[in-house]
Image (tube, grey):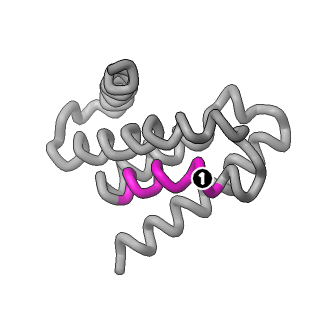
Amino acid sequence: MKKLTYTAMWLAVGVALAYLLHLVNLGRMFLPLHLVAMLAGAVSGAFVGGIVGGLLPVLSFLTMGMPPFPMFLFMIPEVFVYGFILGVMEKKNISSDSPLRFFLADWFTRYLITL
């Protein structure tokens, strides 16, 4: 029940943050969907981070139309991997230095996407 609550909270934060940043034309600069999925994975674990990462682009598209149609399909696996990998790194205590953890998750995600 706790994971469901955290997932719903992170999804609400993600949609609201995306809306606010796109409202002032900062959405492409700060990538709110990626940021929220990474935070969800780092704070709430791999399961919550993965679910948030997989659902957030779909919810954002359905509520605001952003990201546009073909783009959100490519973002689903990317944002999912961001949230999941950061959750796994948190659980395994890999690289307790937070900036390095985010860099490693970014590198790993880009590596998986190019396969």
Residue at the far right in the pictured view: 24
**Residue occupying image coordinates x 52% and y 60%:** 10
Image position of 11 with respect to 40: above or below: below
**Residue occupying image coordinates x 56% and y 52%:** 56
Residue at the far left in the pictured view: 92
Spot occupied by residue 66 in the image (x, y as percentages of width and height): 73, 43
**Residue occupying image coordinates x 75% and y 50%:** 19
Spot occupied by residue 62 in the image (x, y as percentages of width and height): 70, 57
Decide whether residue 40 is among the magenta residues: no
Q: Quadrant of residue 16?
A: bottom right
Image position of 91 with respect to 6: above or below: above
Does the rendering let one see residue 85? yes
Instruction: Answer with left or right where residue 33 lies relative to residue 2.
Output: right
Q: How many marks?
A: 1
Image quarter (top left, top right, bottom left or bottom right) of the N terminus: bottom left
Viewer-closest of 98 and 83: 83
Mark 1: few/some/many CA within 10 Å (<14, 14-19, 20+): some
Does the rendering let one see residue 99? no
Residue at the far bottom in the pictured view: 1
Which SS type dominates the magenta stretch?
Answer: helix
Viewer-closest of 113 and 101: 113
Q: Quadrant of residue 25?
A: top right
Spot occupied by residue 21 in the image (x, y as percentages of width and height): 75, 41
Q: Which residues are magenta?
A: 48-59
At mark 1, the secondary structure is helix
Spot occupied by residue 15 in the image (x, y as percentages of width and height): 66, 55
**Residue occupying image coordinates x 76% and y 48%:** 65
Decide whether residue 49 is among the magenta residues: yes
Instruction: Answer with left or right where residue 15 lies relative to residue 6.
Output: right
Task: Give the labeled residue for mark 1.
Answer: 58
Image quarter (top left, top right, bottom left or bottom right) of the C terminus: top left
Kind of residue at badge 1: Val
